Structure formats: structure tokens, C-alpha cells
Image (cartoon, grey):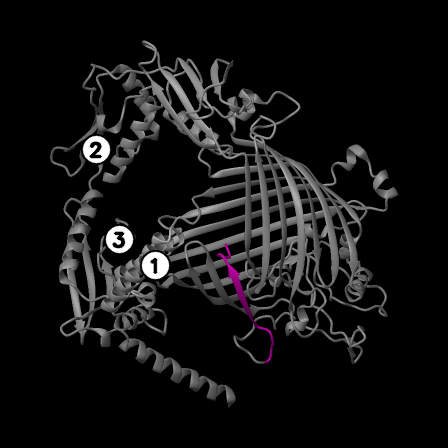
């Protein structure tokens, strides 16, 4: 009966909300105005519907489910409260007042810099308010008042767009329906027959250019048999321009490229002729070969020293840079044809060193008769740079302050190296590893420092000049560091060191990192008695987690590759792939383990692999679909059969499955058992009492060796910088071995069910869903997500699917506060 009453109340609320939403907007219309309530595009079969929508100059207000056009409500209420005349008066009064203060200080011979800066800032704010309105007007969006002139312009724009895509005989009609003061409108499109490219011809008057273009025709954007598309002609013009400039044609530009489009006889298909016109100053396009290269390292400062290295002249002032190092960053070489891409990539290579303020390349054809000279001009950045950062972390829904300090020394040894010292201290929120009742989020203190030395090339035991030159933004880095973390459960120190290489591809969308050697000396100096008991109890069940808190030596070699196909681009689909591979303990095959054993150090041998794939699909203006697959595998081997704690997988939290607390989901279908006040198992009818619901049921982190995470998220805009999202998260972690104690007298912390099995794992996938709000301020995104458990694998089969908002199970909903998007 209670459920029926609650259902009725919810039904009445929904009905009232819908009725109110239907009225929202209309009451703000002026006399004679009408509201564009709904708009559709119909009849599109081959053209891109989203591109057609972009041609329309008037769009209905975004309507949020149930609430209605909240953006219009915010804007209109703000507009009614906005008095531009009052703002203009306040601006004039402020200017008059501050000008008087400035004059007074000038008369007294005092500095006016602060007052002038204050005047500039406040006048800018007044001007912004006069131009864009008050805060509510800038946050919301104006009412979509129907304007027939804009609609007609939109129809013309659609016809022009269709013409550019080969639909020469397309037609656009507009159908409108009025209901009260609301207009529903449809752009009905008849595409007609689309034109194909029937033939392609090329006229250059130059056999060399003809050969170059013909050899590269496989990359052409114009192909016989494909649809005509004016955008492809623009792409082809850019391609030919770059192609010829990359083959020595220094003076060439795309103004020399012309396309002639003709209709084939008795057909809608097209003939396209590409014409390369001749320059005005000669009868042919000249190819240029670089005769010499001069590298000026200090801008316009006086040259105090010069030297030649591998055919390139280097000029220095009072700061010396090793030519051997600079050489690996140059894509230009003497006695080679001019290539525009080599010029751009040389500039990028030099700027990526973080050594120079600018990197310009120009070419001189007059300094030496009949010689083509490349001049590279750079100027060094300040040798020492100190940066400080003070801010707030948002971790697991808890705010914590942090402070970072960085001191950078450039060109430390004359080889363009960067020696950098970093120090940090901060506090952030973590979930207690032992808390059974009360508060769930606690703060931890962490601090540390590291020193790194980065070389702008590959530093290897062998000659790696060609390897460095062929790679893009090649770097080698040596890092030594120390960190300390203090949590209520334990205190932990980590002394670490690593040596590795990083590089990219020329496009910059693929990056690689190879840590040849990474070494950590870990010492857990303090363990809380309750946490130690938890570890001991788990160890008696066969769980090797306690090994991760011994004094230990961790060595590893790892490789990380990121393939970023313009991920996050709002115009077209994009994706992101991260591949991580790691081998731990391979060094022991060379040095053995005797020294470690004599010092009572725990050591680990393991292999680890992880794939993280993300996809972005735009669904139209201000709407998009995102999905993610994150899988991992970490296999411990050797005597310990355990992983270092930091190498385990965890799931749950604001960037994972948002219906579970951070790092608390899993493993598999395992669940904790209820303990009494003395820390012993509660037993009823001879059975251990399971603890499956409530915050206290997630009292310790759940590490796993196998990871599966799946996420799907729809994002839409409410108004201005406020977005909303609906998401579904699924996944879990598993262990390779089942843990169970042979001694019934021992405390059982965790049930069986944590081991991975191909026959059962799909039954143990946890599923959560929810809604979220995002406040996108461009420079950062605040995110609030409410995740709700839909399927909980810790319950017996048949009881895992849960009724939403059920009162019988506590802790179904988890609130997440975070900065940035989840993926």
C-alpha cells in the first residue's frame, strides 16, 4: 500500500512538472511573437543530416526531460532583472571616481599602476555585462522566437550546401504547424539525383610536376566514380600544394592550382580538370635544393663563436649548445630538396626541447649568388625557472589542499639537458581500508620530492644519432625520487628510480614511453593494529595481500603507447587507445636474489598488460555518445605469488563504476562477512552472516589481478556551460586463485567467489547506472554523478538484479564529486 501511495505521488509530480514545462517559455513572449517549439529535418537519404542541421540559423530551445527549456527560463528571468542603463551609469560613476583617485596619486608623485590595472579589469567586466548581459543571461539561452526571415535564409543555406555535395536539382520546402503561440516546423528536403565524377584530367605544362602528381594520385581526394563534393576539391588543393612544396617547389602556393568543372554530355555527371598555372616571373616552377644551413642559437645577439658540424654552421653568443645534440633535432639537411614539412617539423622539434623561446626558419636566395641558404634562428629561454602551484584535489568526493614546487635548470651541461627538482605536499580523500561504521572518507597526508635529468635525444651505449633523427621528439630521462604517504591504516615510504625513453610520431597523435628500468624500495613503517589484523585474517584465507606491505624491492620494465585519434573532437567521431605492458622482476635473472634475501626484502615477479579504449561519437549539436572498454591482466609468479600493492587493479569510484565506492567493487561474487565488536565472525544457525549492503559492507579495498570495465555515457547540453549525462557502468575485478581458510576457527573476512572462471565471469559483472551534471568552465569541469546499483554480483544468483530505489537494500546509490570527465 505504501508503494502505491508513493507511486501516486510520483505520478502527480510528473504530471504537474510536464504541465509546467509545457507553459515554460510562452509566457515570456512579447505581443505578436511566437515560439519555435519543435523543428525537424525530413527527406534526407544520402546527405549528412547533422551538416544540414548546421545550416539552420534558428533552433528550438533545448528541452531537458520533464523540466523543459530551463536555459530559456534562466535567460529570460535574467533579462527581466537586467537594467543596461543602470550598468552604464555604474560604469561611468566608477570611471569618474577612479580617475579622480589616479589624478590625486599622480599629483602626489605616487605610482598608479595598481589603480590603472583595477580600472582596466572592472571596465572590462562592465563592458562584458553590457555586451552579454548579467550572469543569468550568460548562463542561459534566449527564447527561440520564430523569425521567418531567418528560416528563409536557412533554406537557402541548405540548398547551397546540397549543391556543394552534388545534389544539383535539390529542393527545400518548409512546413509549419501552429498550436496557440507554438510553431512546429519541418524542413522537407528532396535531394534529387546526385552527380558523380565521370573523369579526371591534369594539365601542368611541366613533365616533372606531372610525374610527381601522378605518382601520388593514390592519395587524391578526387576519384572517378565517387560523388562530387566541393569540400574534397578544397582538400585536393591543399594536398597538391603541400605535395609540391615537399618536392622542392619553395615558391609554389595553392593560388597556382585551378579546377575546371564541366558536365558530361547528356548526363548529370562531371568532368574535372586540374590545372597547374605557371608563375608570372618565369615559364616554369623552379625546384630549390638547400645549399647550406646556418643555425643561430641566440637570436639577434652578437656572434662570439661559430663551428661546423656535419656540414651545418652553428653560431653562438655567450651560451653554448652542443651541435651534436642540436643535430638530432634537425629535419633539414644540406644538398637536399626543399621540403616544407621538414621546415615545420624542425621548428616543432626545437620548441619541444623546452630550451628555446622561438624557432624560426627562413630561406635566402640573394645572400650568395645562385645559392639557397636555410637560416635557423632561435633564442634561449631563461636558464632558471621556478614555478609554484597551490590548489585543491577532489578525490573520492573529498577536497584536499596541495602545494607543488618546481625548479628547472635548462642547458645544465651545455647539451640542452633539463635538470628539474620537484617537491610536493598535499592531502586528499581516500576510503578507509578498515572502517566498518561511521564516516567513510578520510584524509591522507603525502609529500615527496624527485629530481630528473632529461636529454633531448636517445642516450644509449651505441651510436643512436640516426635513431634519434628518425624519431620525433626523442628524449631520455633519469629520475630519482622519494615519497611518503600517511594514512590512518599505515605509513609508507617509497624510494624510486627509473631510466627510460619517450618519443612520438610526426603527427603527434601517437606517443610512446619505454622505462628500461624502474626500481622501487618500499618500506611500510607503520601498520595500524586493526589493519594488521585484517591482513592477517586475509592471509589465513590464502590471500597474499599482506605481502604487499612487507619491506620490499620492486623492479620492472614497462612500455606505454597512446594512440589518440583526435579524441574529444566535437565535430566528428574520434577514439583513444592506451596499451600498457610490464614485466616485473626480470632483473633478478641477471643479478640474482641473494642480496635481497639477506636483507629480508620481499621481491616480486609478475607480468602485466592493460588496454584502455575510448570512443566519442557526436550525435548532433550539443549531444554525444561516449563509451569505454578497459581490460587488464596481472599475473604474479615466483615464490610470493603476489603483486606489489600499486600493481593490483581496482574498480569502483568516480572514474570507474560510479555505483560503487572507490576501489571497493569485487572481487568476482565474493562478499565480506559481518564481524562483531571483538572482530570475530557473527554466526547464526551455524552459518557465517554475510554483509552485502550498506556502507559498512565496503570496509576494505578489493584488489584484483584481472580487470574488466565497460562504460557507456550519453551527454547533452542543458544550457550554456551546464551539461547533463546518463551513464551505464559495468565490470569487476577477479583473482587467479580462490582464497579460503582450512581452519574454521579463524576469522573469515571475505567469502569465496573471487576467482576468475570463463564459465561464470559474465554472471559476476556488476552493473550500475545513473545521471550526472557537468559544469564546463573551459579551463576545468566540475562533475556530479549519482550512480545506482542495478546488478550486484555479491548476492546469490537470482537475487543480483535490483529494483531501483528499493528500501530493502541500503547503499544502492553512490554520490560522486569529481573534476574532469570520467573518460
Residue at 17%, 73% (x, y): give it: 30
Lower sequence index among marks 2 and 3: 3
Q: Are marks 2 and 3 in contact (CB under 8 Å)?
A: no
Of the numbered discs in the image, which one, if any, rests on residue 54? 3
Residue 61 relative to residue 382: left or right: left
Whether residue 818 appears in magenta in the rendering, the answer is yes
Res 559 seen here: yes
Residue 653, image quadrant: bottom right
Sequence-wise, the earlier of marks 1 and 3 is 3
Q: Which residue is mark 2?
A: 198
Most extreme residue toward the bottom, as rendered? 1
- In the depicted view, which residue is nearer to us: 340 or 604? 340
* Secondary element type, mark 3: loop
Image location (x, y in percent) of residue 813: 55, 72
Instruction: Say what secondary structure mark 1 lies in.
Output: helix
Q: Residue furthest left?
A: 266
Closer mark to the observer between disc 2 and disc 1:
1
Mark 2 neighbour class, 10 Å CA radius: few under 14, some 14 to 19, many 20 or more: some
Give the image location of residue 543, x and y in percent.
77, 58
Label placed on residue 674: none
Q: Position of residue 700 (x, y in %)?
A: 70, 65
Residue stretch rendered in magenta on the structure: 808-823
For the residues labelled 1 and 3, the Cα–Cα distance comes to 51 Å
Q: Which residue is mark 1?
A: 101
Q: Is residue 68 magenta?
A: no
Question: Residue 783 at what x, y percent from top left?
Answer: 48, 62
Amino acid at each position: 500500500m505504501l508503494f502505491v501511495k508513493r507511486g501516486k505521488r510520483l505520478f502527480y509530480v510528473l504530471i504537474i512538472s510536464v504541465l509546467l514545462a509545457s507553459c515554460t517559455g510562452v509566457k515570456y513572449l512579447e505581443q505578436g511573437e511566437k515560439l519555435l517549439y519543435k523543428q525537424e529535418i525530413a527527406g534526407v537519404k544520402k546527405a549528412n543530416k547533422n551538416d544540414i542541421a548546421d545550416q539552420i540559423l534558428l533552433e528550438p530551445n533545448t528541452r531537458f526531460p520533464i523540466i523543459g527549456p530551463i536555459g530559456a527560463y534562466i535567460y529570460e528571468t535574467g533579462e527581466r532583472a537586467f537594467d543596461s542603463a543602470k550598468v552604464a551609469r555604474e560604469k561611468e560613476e566608477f570611471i569618474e571616481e577612479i580617475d579622480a583617485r589616479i589624478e590625486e596619486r599622480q599629483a602626489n608623485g605616487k605610482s598608479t599602476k595598481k589603480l590603472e590595472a583595477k580600472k582596466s579589469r572592472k571596465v572590462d567586466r562592465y563592458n562584458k555585462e553590457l555586451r552579454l548581459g548579467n550572469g543569468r543571461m550568460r548562463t542561459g539561452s534566449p527564447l527561440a522566437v520564430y523569425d521567418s526571415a531567418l528560416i528563409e535564409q536557412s533554406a537557402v543555406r541548405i540548398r547551397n550546401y546540397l549543391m556543394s555535395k552534388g545534389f544539383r536539382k535539390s529542393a527545400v520546402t518548409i512546413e509549419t504547424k501552429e498550436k496557440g503561440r507554438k510553431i512546429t516546423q519541418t524542413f522537407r528536403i528532396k535531394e534529387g539525383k546526385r552527380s558523380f565524377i565521370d573523369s579526371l584530367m591534369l594539365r601542368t605544362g611541366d613533365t616533372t610536376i606531372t610525374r610527381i602528381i601522378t605518382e601520388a594520385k593514390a592519395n587524391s581526394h578526387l576519384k572517378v566514380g565517387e560523388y562530387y563534393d566541393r569540400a574534397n576539391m578544397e582538400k585536393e588543393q591543399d594536398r597538391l600544394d603541400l605535395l609540391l612544396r615537399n618536392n622542392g617547389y619553395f615558391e609554389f602556393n595553392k593560388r597556382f592550382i585551378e579546377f575546371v568543372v564541366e558536365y558530361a554530355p547528356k548526363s548529370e555527371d562531371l568532368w574535372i580538370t586540374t590545372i597547374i598555372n605557371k608563375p608570372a616571373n618565369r615559364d616554369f616552377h623552379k625546384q630549390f635544393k638547400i645549399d647550406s644551413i646556418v643555425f643561430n642559437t641566440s637570436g639577434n645577439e652578437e656572434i662570439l663563436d661559430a663551428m661546423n658540424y656535419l656540414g651545418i654552421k652553428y653560431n653562438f653568443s655567450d651560451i653554448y649548445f652542443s651541435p651534436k645534440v642540436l643535430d638530432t633535432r634537425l629535419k633539414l639537411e644540406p644538398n637536399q630538396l626543399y621540403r616544407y614539412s621538414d621546415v615545420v617539423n624542425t621548428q616543432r622539434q626545437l620548441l619541444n626541447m623546452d630550451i628555446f623561446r622561438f624557432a624560426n626558419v627562413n630561406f635566402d636566395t640573394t645572400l650568395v649568388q645562385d645559392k639557397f641558404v636555410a637560416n635557423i634562428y632561435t633564442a634561449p629561454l631563461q636558464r632558471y625557472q621556478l614555478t609554484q602551484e597551490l590548489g585543491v584535489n577532489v578525490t573520492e568526493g573529498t577536497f584536499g589542499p596541495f602545494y607543488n614546487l618546481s625548479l628547472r635548470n635548462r642547458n645544465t651541461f651545455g647539451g640542452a639537458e633539463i635538470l628539474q627538482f620537484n617537491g610536493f605536499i598535499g592531502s586528499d580523500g581516500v576510503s578507509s581500508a578498515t572502517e566498518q561504521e561511521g564516516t567513510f572518507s578520510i584524509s591522507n597526508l603525502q609529500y615527496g620530492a624527485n629530481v630528473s635529468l632529461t636529454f633531448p635525444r636517445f642516450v644509449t651505449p651505441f651510436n643512436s644519432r640516426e635513431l634519434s633523427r628518425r624519431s620525433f621528439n626523442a628524449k631520455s630521462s633519469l629520475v630519482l625520487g622519494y615519497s611518503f604517504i600517511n594514512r590512518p591504516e599505515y605509513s609508507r615510504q617509497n624510494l624510486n628510480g627509473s631510466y627510460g625513453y619517450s618519443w612520438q610520431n610526426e603527427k603527434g597523435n601517437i606517443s610512446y614511453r619505454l622505462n628500461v628500468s624502474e626500481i622501487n624500495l618500499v618500506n611500510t613503517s607503520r601498520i595500524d593494529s586493526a589493519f594488521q589484523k585484517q591482513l592477517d585474517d586475509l592471509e589465513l584465507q590464502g590471500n597474499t595481500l599482506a605481502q604487499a606491505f612487507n619491506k620490499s624491492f620492486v623492479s620492472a620494465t614497462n612500455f606505454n603507447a597512446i594512440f589518440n585519434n583526435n579524441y574529444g573532437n566535437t565535430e566528428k567521431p574520434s577514439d583513444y587507445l592506451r596499451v600498457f605492458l610490464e614485466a616485473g622482476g626480470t632483473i633478478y635473472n641477471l643479478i640474482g636474489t641473494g642480496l635481497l634475501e639477506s636483507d629480508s626484502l620481499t621481491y616480486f615477479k609478475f607480468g602485466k598488460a592493460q588496454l584502455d579504449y575510448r570512443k566519442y561519437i557526436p550525435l548532433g549539436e550539443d549531444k554525444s555518445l561516449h563509451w569505454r572498454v578497459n581490460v587488464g591482466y596481472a599475473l604474479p609468479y615466483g615464490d610470493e605469488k603476489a603483486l606489489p600493492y600499486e600493481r593490483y587493479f581496482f574498480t569502483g569510484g568516480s572514474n570507474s563504476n560510479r555505483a560503487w565506492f572507490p576501489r571497493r567493487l569485487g572481487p568476482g561474487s565474493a562478499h565480506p562477512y559481518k564481524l562483531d565488536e571483538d572482530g570475530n565472525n557473527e554466526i547464526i544457525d551455524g552459518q557465517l552472516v554475510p554483509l552485502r549492503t550498506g556502507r559498512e559492507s565496503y570496509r576494505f579495498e578489493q584488489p584484483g589481478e584481472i580487470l574488466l570495465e565497460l562504460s557507456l555515457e550519453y551527454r547533452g547540453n542543458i544550457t550554456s556551460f551546464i551539461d547533463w549525462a546518463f551513464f551505464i557502468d559495468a565490470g569487476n575485478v577477479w583473482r587467479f586463485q580462490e582464497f579460503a581458510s582450512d581452519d574454521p576457527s579463524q576469522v573469515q573476512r571475505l567469502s569465496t567467489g573471487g576467482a576468475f572462471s570463463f564459465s561464470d565471469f559474465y554472471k559476476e559483472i556488476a552493473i550500475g547506472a545513473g545521471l550526472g551534471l557537468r559544469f564546463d568552465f573551459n579551463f576545468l569541469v566540475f562533475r556530479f554523478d549519482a550512480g545506482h546499483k542495478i546488478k550486484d554480483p555479491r548476492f546469490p544468483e537470482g537475487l543480483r538484479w535490483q529494483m531501483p530505489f528499493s528500501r530493502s537494500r541500503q547503499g544502492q546509490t553512490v554520490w560522486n564529486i569529481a573534476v574532469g570527465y570520467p573518460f
